[in-house]
Amino acid sequence: MMNNNDQEWLTLVDSIGNYLAPSMAKDHPNLPVVKAEGCYYYGADGKKYLDFTSGIAVENVGHRHPKVVQAIKNSSDYLIHGPSGVIIYESILKLAADLQEILPPKLDNFFFGNSGTEAIEGALKLAKYVTKRPYVISFTGGFHGRTIGSLSVSTSKSKYRKYLQPSWLTYQLPYANPADCPADRESEEFFAEKLEQEAAELFRHQVDPEEVACMIVEPVMGEGGYIIPPKSWLKKIREICDRYGILLIFDEVQTGFGRTGNWFAAQTFDVTPDIMAVAKGIAAGMPLGVTIASQELMKQWPMGTHATTFGGNPIACAAARASIEVIKEEKLLENSREMGEYTLARLAGLQRKFPIIQDVRGVGLMIGIALQNPKTGDPDGEAVMRVLDGCLEKGVLFYLCGNAGEVIRMIPPLTVSKEQIDAGIKVLEDVLETI
């Protein structure tokens, strides 16, 4: 039952446009909630919603994990704000030490910011400063953030760049989509060869590789459609970068902290970048992002060339430390792999049953369900919205991605159980029956 306060703020929800910018207030599904816990949201309508969005891949240890909540409370008793550099505090140094233990070798020095886009900005600035080279190469369909620098390398949707064309000149290479592999070729071989040719063409006609500071890539494409490239393709990117002295940046904002079944996708694909950007799942909902590189690189980025007021907030760092402990103690990397494999098997059954499902793909608990028009084979973003709305009515929250919004994102907390997976897929199946 709602109390007066609930009714008062729900009245505000009805006139949300009077208070919040449409770009903030009109995302899907704009569900009024009063509480979140574990794998669930609790709506102002009194309903309980199974959350398969994890706050868009943020709540990897589940909403309001008791250990994280306690860490936030304990930290706030002593310190709320830094700023790092003016003062120094325990949580930021201990978090750095914790991260060194779980990252690939030599990724051991950190610049703490507040978000994923800040982590990307730091990575791009570091690469440009260290190499003294002007240009950046990204991959078509990638999404790296919404500030001008990160937007300059984002191409998942043209609307994100409309009227905002960044001043940085960047170049793009095609992302490896296994769906584009010829039937008579193996994708591991095909895309590595193709990239070699595409890079040679780019360097021959558009930009000299000696002027390229870095290549930036999502090891698994996120907002652009949850596309999982062949391992050999990422290794070929590493090889090309090494050949020309180009730094490799991995955008692990969405793939980090267990989402792909390992701490980071770099470990899943066995490719180590020079610079990594992480955020989202690092601090269980607290604002924190990190630009990561070797001490060798970071030492070439002297004091004053990059700075922050709020980055590495002591409470956010405490929450991140607690989140890492939870992932270890509750064996969430293992659960991510096991539940991911189980979910893909269940969804494969739905794909055989429903022609509207064009593809099911995933690694760990980063899973995409692509919908199509069964008659034409065209991507069907309208069908995705009908499915999302239908599932919401039945108490399950999914999200969307893809250039045409044609992919359902299924990204539950890494704490998700088999019973919760079954419950969510049953709702998805029931809704697909009606589409």
Image (cartoon, rainbow, N blue to C red):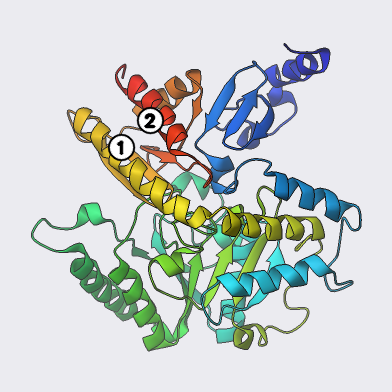
- Up-down relation of residue 136 to residue 181 (above or below): below
- The residue where tag 2 is placed is 425
Give the Cα distance between marks 2 and 1.
Answer: 8 Å
Left or right: 42 in relation to 401: right
- 393 or 128, which lies in front? 393
Q: Provide residue 377's location: percent of width, then percent of height.
A: 20, 35
Answer whether residue 206 is visible to the viewer in this image: no
Please tell me which residue is depicted at 19% across the width and 67% down the height of the picture: 190
Q: Are marks 2 and 1 in contact (CB under 8 Å)?
A: yes
Crowding around mark 2 (Cα neighbors within 10 Å: few <14, some 14 to 19, many 20+) is some
Please tell me which residue is depicted at 44% across the width and 33% down the height of the picture: 419
- Up-down relation of residue 72 to residue 8 (above or below): below
Helix, strand or loop under label 1: helix
Helix, strand or loop under label 2: helix
- The residue where tag 1 is placed is 347
Please tell me which residue is depicted at 29% across the width and 64% down the height of the picture: 230
Q: Provide residue 240's location: percent of width, then percent of height.
A: 35, 81
- Going by the numbered disc 2, the residue's amino acid type is Ile
Left or right: 151 in relation to 378: right
Image quadrant where residue 47 sits: top right
Image quadrant where residue 142 sits: bottom left
- Up-down relation of residue 415 to residue 337 (above or below): above
